[in-house]
Image (cartoon, helix red, strand yellow):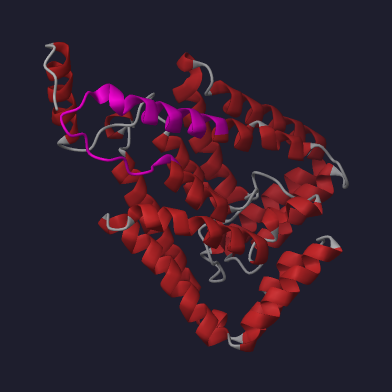
Amino acid sequence: MARFLPLTRRQVRVALGLMWLLDAALQGAPALFTASWWRTDLAQSVMGQPMAVNHSIFWAVNIIAAHPTAWNSGFIAIQATLGLALITGRFERAAIIASIPWALGIWWVGEGFGTLPTGFALLAAGSPGPVLFYPLIGILAWPRRRPATTASSNHAPASGVCQRAGLTAWVVLWAGQALLQIPWSFPSAQVLTANIEESSQGQPGWLSAIAHTTETLARHHAVALTVTLAVVQIAVGIGVLIPRARRPSLTAGIALSLAFWLTFQYLGGIPGGDATDPGSGPLLVLLALSLWSPQWAPRRGEAKELALAQSVTSSGILVG
């Protein structure tokens, strides 16, 4: 895998753009142009929410359901525009900035704040919400200006800041969310099985078989599974802070993200035909790949420019 890494910022943005286009394609499912989908399927995001959150989501859903074709067409256009901007490299900064309020709106109405207020949120099941990863990864892969015969050190601090921010986000996502394993409001078995049952509804037989196996394990070994998940998440999160353990931790994070995507998120619900996003698994993998190197890799051609700048600076030549 190392031969394909590290990813450049540009490659990360292209991958993120493809994810936005996938979201737009999934948003184009015929059911999403009907009022019933918004009032029934999407309304499930209010289940178990505090009263204020419940009312706010229903308020927004009722507005959308009044004109579902127009609203959903607009949603598709927005997500496709964000994806194309990142893929083509035009208006990338504007797209990343615009993705922040857009993602927050989806996080509120579409994901019910990642179910965090309900007490049922789990990293394995997609918490804190897949849509939050889009602006996060976009900001970490923020396009930097091409160097104009200036020293590469002028660009190293920006890389360092992005790298530290990315590592901090990784620690919070993995180690911080281990706290969700604590049975604050509901028993561990109930939290695990509720997430499995919710995500596996309407999935094809082979995924339902995986769901049955996972649910059986959760019912009979809830405490052991909960403790194991918490310990592993803490190890994956804290490990990136140790230079020698960074890549093993990221590799473990990639493996776990894919395992969670299969056993708790059921490939984001895509095989069942009712998905509006691919789930958090692929996005966590992209985040891990973008953090693989201590510094972001330069784009093609940029490495030569940076090397030339270094040689000019080391020779004592002042560039005006």
Name the quadrant containing residue 229: top right
x, y percent for residue 3: 27, 30
Name the quadrant containing residue 45: bottom right
For the magenta stretch, what is the residue range? 140-168
x, y percent for residue 173: 61, 38
Q: Nearer the viewer, residue 10 or 184?
A: 10
Does residue 173 appear in this view? yes
Name the quadrant containing residue 144: top left
- Quarter placement of the N terminus: top left
Name the residue at the top extreme: 315
Does residue 47 appear in this view? no
Name the residue at the front extreme: 320
Q: Residue at x 82, y 43 (%)?
A: 188
Q: Is residue 281 magenta?
A: no
Query: Is 228 situated above or below 66?
Result: above
Q: Residue at x 65, y 50 (%)?
A: 125
Q: Is residue 144 magenta?
A: yes
Q: Nearer the viewer, residue 175 or 307?
A: 307
Query: Is 283 situated above or below 5?
Result: below
Q: Nearer the viewer, residue 236 or 308?
A: 308
Query: Is 200 situated above or below 35?
Result: above
Q: Residue at x 32, y 28 (%)?
A: 2
x, y percent for residue 148: 17, 34
